Amino acid sequence: MHTSETIKIKKSPYIKYKGAINSPNNQFYLGYSLLCLEQYGALFTAQEISHQPHLWRQLYKELSNKAEEWRPFLLEALAKPDLQIVLCGAGSSGFVGKTIAPWLRQHSGLNTYSYAVTDIVAAPKHYLDINKPTLLVSYARSGNSPVTDHVKLIH
């Protein structure tokens, strides 16, 4: 675990945690200054990670407000005893499923799996069982992509 001490990467004076050094406009992401993140090509990634909590809270509010639209569909799907739930995303979105699938399996008892959408497109029969009802949950940072649309057509 880091403290407010300098992290020694090429002895940059800008690699310090928030409060330890001033950054232009006093902007920090994940505790690192803008200059540090730009220097190491990590600014975009740090900004994306930093925005996630807000985005997840926003999604929760939107889903809660529209529950009457999606709840009947989901309850019908979840009532099927042999339902398989497949979470899929591409790139960093794929890590979301890898993170939550084990938790969902453990806490719900449902057959929940996570696969990269690119893996499903490349070999759908290896990942999707056409003999079982499947709830495919496709997600992406930027909405639907051609790859996720292709998965929906395959299944």
Image (tube, rainbow, N blue to C red):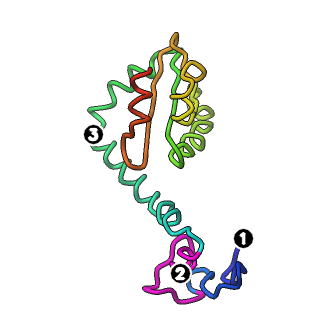
Pick whichever, 83 or 153, lies toward us. Answer: 153
Occupied quadrant, residue 72: top left
131 lies above or below 113: above
Among the two numbered marks 2 and 1 on one chain, the one whose residue lies closer to the N terminus: 1
Amino acid type at image mark 2: Leu
User: If the image is split into quadrants, where does the N terminus sit?
Assistant: bottom right
Amino acid type at image mark 3: Lys
User: The magenta stretch spans which residues?
Assistant: 20-39
Give the Cα separation between the discs numbered 1 and 3.
Answer: 41 Å
Among the two numbered marks 3 and 2 on one chain, the one whose residue lies closer to the N terminus: 2
Residue found 52% across the figure and 10% down from its top: 131
Question: From the viewer's perspective, is the residue at label 1 or at label 3 nearer?
Answer: 1
Give the Cα separation between the discs numbered 3 and 2.
Answer: 41 Å
Residue found 39% across the figure and 23% down from its top: 153
Occupied quadrant, residue 4: bottom right
Residue sitting farthest toward the top: 131
- Which of the numbered marks, if any, corresponds to residue 1? 1
Give SS at disc 2.
helix
The residue at which mark 3 appears reads as 66
Amino acid type at image mark 1: Met
The residue at which mark 2 appears reads as 35
For mark 1, does the 10 Å Cα neighbourhood hold few (<14), some (14 to 19), or many (20 or more) residues? Answer: few
Left or right of residue 38: residue 66:
left
Give SS at disc 3.
loop
Residue found 43% across the figure and 40% down from its top: 139
Residue found 47% across the figure and 61% down from its top: 48
Give the Cα separation between the discs numbered 2 and 1.
Answer: 22 Å
Residue 3: image location, x then y, percent: 69, 79
